[in-house]
Image: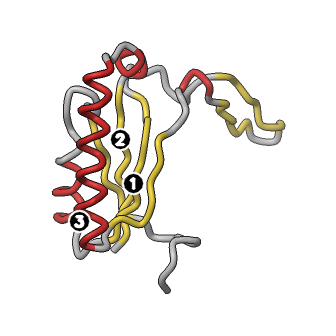
Amino acid sequence: MKFLVLMYADPAATAAMTEAERADVFARHEALHRDLAETGEMLNGAGLGYPADTTTLRWRGAKPASAAGGPLTSATEQATAYYVVECASRERAVEIARRLLDFHVVAVEVRAVHDWFGMGGE
């Protein structure tokens, strides 16, 4: 089963991180990457641009879509990175996601991926 592991952080807190804090976050992600490379569970992942640099399009019915700068919501925590993992169960995906929670990644969503392409396999 494939799962999207979507990480949320406060972009202002990310920008204010010290070099030591950045190094800690990087080391933790590298350790997770190594572990998941060994098990074959990591399919892909990426960090996302800052929400302030986002363009959000909204459906307006029969009118053309409107575009606005900034994220979809004004919440403090914004989507900042993701992994796509393939593992045996939702429980395993949640176990992987738990390793991401810390002072930087303050929330993680785990969602099943039901329609996919470009990730190898079937």
Q: Amino acid at mark 1?
A: Tyr
Q: Which residue is mark 2?
A: 7
Residue 28 vs residue 65, the one in the foreground = 28
Q: Which residue is mark 1?
A: 83
- The residue carrying pointer 2 sits among few (fewer than 14), some (14 to 19) or many (20 or more) residues within 10 Å by Cα, namely many
- The residue carrying pointer 1 sits among few (fewer than 14), some (14 to 19) or many (20 or more) residues within 10 Å by Cα, namely some
Q: Quadrant of the N terminus?
A: bottom left
Seen at 24% across and 32% down, the residue is: 24
Q: CA distance from mark 2 to mark 3?
A: 16 Å
Seen at 19% across and 33% down, the residue is: 102
Residue 15 vs residue 113, the one in the foreground = 15
Q: Secondary structure at mark 2?
A: strand
Q: Position of residue 3 (x, y in %)?
A: 36, 63
Q: Are marks 2 and 1 in contact (CB under 8 Å)?
A: yes
Q: Amino acid at mark 3?
A: Arg
Which badge, 1 or 3, comes first in the chain's sequence?
Answer: 1
Q: Residue lying farthest bottom? A: 122
Q: CA distance from mark 2 to mark 1?
A: 8 Å
| Quadrant of the image occupied by residue 88 | bottom left
Q: How many dots with numbers?
A: 3
82 relative to 55, above or below: below
81 relative to 53, above or below: below
- Where residue 90 is drawn, which disc sits there? 3
